[in-house]
Image (cartoon, rainbow, N blue to C red):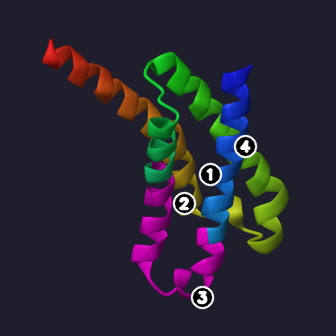
Amino acid sequence: MKTFLKALISGFLLWAIMFDLMFLSSGIYNQYDLIKFLIPLLSGIIAVLFINYLKVKNIKQAAIYSIIWLTIVLFFDYFVTVKFVDQTFNYIYFWFAYILIFISPLIYVSLLKKKSIWKK
């Protein structure tokens, strides 16, 4: 239950940070393709930072966090972000961010496991 609560809170924080970044960069978002690439990349980086902060050490727990985070982000994007960006789900950059939110923690934890295996 504690893991689920941490996942809910961190998932909401992940969405809120990404929403704020999108809002703050909205003036230049459509002018520069680099911004369209960096914002989704930041979503993956933030997901990895959260996984590291929460000290997730196994792939099963990372998968639980990834699924919950992706569900929360999709939920809030569907009910909140769409009110500001009506074509949210039509942009490839949003889908890139969703993919990174899901796979980044899994890749990070699996690389941590490999690193600890190499040390032995």
Q: CA distance from mark 1 to mark 3?
A: 21 Å
Q: Nearer the viewer, mark 1 or mark 2?
A: 1
Q: Nearer the viewer, mark 1 or mark 4?
A: 1
- Report the label total: 4
Q: CA distance from mark 4 to mark 2?
A: 19 Å
Q: Nearer the viewer, mark 3 or mark 2?
A: 3
Q: Is residue 28 magenta?
A: yes
Chain part drawn in magenta: 21-44
Q: CA distance from mark 3 to mark 4?
A: 26 Å
Amino acid carrying label 1: it is Leu
Give the residue displayed 59% in from the left and 70% down from the top.
Answer: 21
Dot label at residue 14: 1
Dot label at residue 97: none
Tell me if residue 29 comes above or below residue 65 in the rendering.
below
Question: What element does badge 4 sit on?
Answer: helix
Asked if the residues shown at circle 1 and circle 3 are in contact, with their CB atoms under 8 angstroms apart, the answer is: no
Q: Give the mark nearer the N terminus: 3 vs 4.
A: 3
